[in-house]
Image (spheres, grey):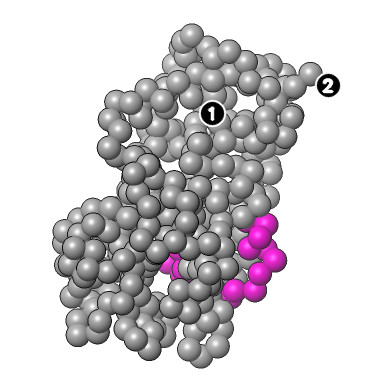
Amino acid sequence: MPFLTEPEPPRGTPLDVLPSIRRIVARNPSVMTYQGTNTYLISGADGLTILDPGPQDAQHVRDILAAAGEVPIRRIVLTHTHGDHMGALADLQAATGLPVHGYRISGRAGFTADILLGDGDIVAGMGALFTPGHAADHLCFEYSLPDGPKILFSGDHVMSWSSSIVSPPDGNMLHYYRSLELLLGRDEVMYLGGHGPLLEQPRALVAELLAHRRYREGEIFKQIEKKTWVVAELAQHLYAKTDPYLKGAAQRNVLAHLLKLKDEGIAVEHAPASALPTGVEALGPPPGLVIDESASKGGFMREMRRDALRRFGLAAC
Ligand SMILES: [Zn+2]
């Protein structure tokens, strides 16, 4: 895959991305978040729009306020409700007193945005595009630059540095395919993602992302044609990952593919295995992707382990 890299960016300093758009990279680098979450500062006629406050980090919020300087912050907008994008929201709202705009049906238990957005709604000149898949409440935003070209704030749906994790039930592979296909029919010339640098000629990458998922789905189909698989075992068989986070992500992606095939009547789910095969571990994605931090981490991990034991095979014809 033709992914981009970038040197470690300076922290706390707004970086010029495009005319009227700056980003601050948060201090949460990891194998799942690359150099950190991008918080975008978009300058409009009435002041600034903050897109994705970023992870919970008091210094990051101070950095956003310092970058705004004398220019008033007018609104806060979320691409989705994962912790690495909205963790700083409460502190930023406390500092600014501003409402937050987000998708009308929140994917996070106990949270609802103050101003609800649906597909096609406009906020500060940005058009919301409902793009579930990575997250059930994911929005991209189309935006016309002052000098003409159209760009897309693509959140974690499409990123320049990596493919997205699709972790059920918040993540849904069938929706992810549809949301990628939606972008293929559009004409934005650049994407600004939730992590990583600006992406040019974005549709080429979107096409590759889709092709890659279809290839993976084909591989999974070939395996379930042969026998019934436990999720964790199939992930280990297909993805040669050593990093525990990436291993966990691979298990979530495999489960997402199997559930898509199940929804399409191609796969069936059997009673879960009682134990994992020797040498296979059940692992979940890291806390950035924990949808509801108020639920105990233990409960979340138990759920991940249960998912890793789920078993799927080919539907009888
Ligand atoms: Zn993210």
Q: Nearer the viewer, residue 14 or 131?
A: 131
**CA–CA distance in space, label 1 to label 2:** 25 Å
Which residue is found at the position 31% from the left and 77% from the top? Answer: 74
SS for dot 1: helix
Looking at the rendered structure, the kind of residue marked 1 is Ala
Rendered location of residue 213, percent (x, y): 63, 45
Rendered location of residue 210, percent (x, y): 65, 51
Looking at this rendering, what residue extends furthest in the right direction?
317
Q: Which of the two labelled residues, at mark 1 and mark 2, occupies the earlier sequence position? A: 1
Ligand 1 within 8 angstroms of badge 2 C-beta:
no
The magenta-colored residue range is 180-199
Rendered location of residue 137, percent (x, y): 48, 52
Q: Is residue 61 visible?
A: no
**Quarter of image, res 281:** top left
Residue 262 falls left or right of residue 83: right
Ligand 1 within 8 angstroms of badge 1 C-beta:
no
Q: Quadrant of the C terminus?
A: top right
- For disc 2, the neighbor class at 10 Å (few under 14, some 14 to 19, many from 20) is few
Q: Which residue is mark 2?
A: 317
Q: Which residue is mark 1?
A: 235
**Quarter of image, res 80:** bottom left
Which residue is found at the position 30% from the left and 62% from the top? Answer: 53
Q: Nearer the viewer, residue 153 or 251?
A: 153
